[in-house]
Amino acid sequence: YDPPNLTFPFGAYVCVVDIDRGTGQVKIREFLAVDDCGTIINPMIVEGQIHGGLTMGMAPALFEEIVYDENGTMLTGTFMDYLLPTAMETPHWKTDKTVTPSPHHPLGAKGVGESPTIGAPPAIVNAVVDALSHLGVRHIDIPITPARVYQILLEKGVAE
């Protein structure tokens, strides 16, 4: 099936982080998301979709990791060890919206939750790399765990 038209949402995301040099813990200090939602039909639901998408995007950037031992046994098979963000780790998301009505939808609406889910991880990774760039860091694998960041800080001689 090839539909005659498609509607794509889009957004822009900027993140600022703080890094604890004693633990490697990354904390999102500020996050701004601007999403083009098309015609907004229900503002409260749109805001909830954006917040949910941002939190879902934060998960692979900072938490979610499947770990196996040397025999191939999964070590992160429960939510005790496969980490997900909770309300405690979720920052206050600053959001804004642009409205470009979709010409392919009768109300001009677009999807809302997808863009922040896709845009949040690279914004967070870029913020961490930027925070560590004065140490020569140009790349860090996700998830950006405290242990991974602390190892970098140790190697660069700046861990507390």
Image: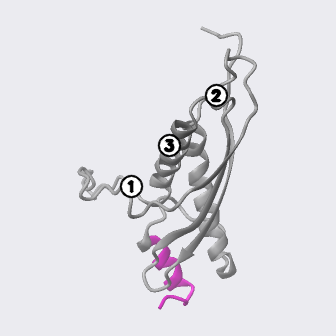
Q: Are marks 2 and 3 in contact (CB under 8 Å)?
A: no
**What is the quadrant of residue 9 in the picture?**
top right
Name the one closer to the observer, 71 or 112. 112
CA–CA distance in space, label 1 to label 2: 31 Å
Question: Viewer-nearest of labels 1 and 2?
Answer: 2
Asked if residue 57 lies left or right of residue 33, the reply is left
Q: Which residues are magenta?
A: 148-160
- Which of marks 2 and 1 precedes in the sequence? 1
Question: What amino acid type should be assigned to the residue bearing mark 3?
Answer: Gly
Mark 2 surroundings within 10 Å by alpha-carbon count, few (fewer than 14), some (14 through 19), many (20 or more): many
What's the mark number on residue 65? 1
Give the vertical position of 128 relative to 44 (above or below): below
Asked if residue 103 lies left or right of residue 60, the reply is right
At 50% from the left edge and 43% from the top edge, which residue is drawn?
48
Mark 3 — residue?
A: 48
- Which of marks 3 and 2 precedes in the sequence? 3
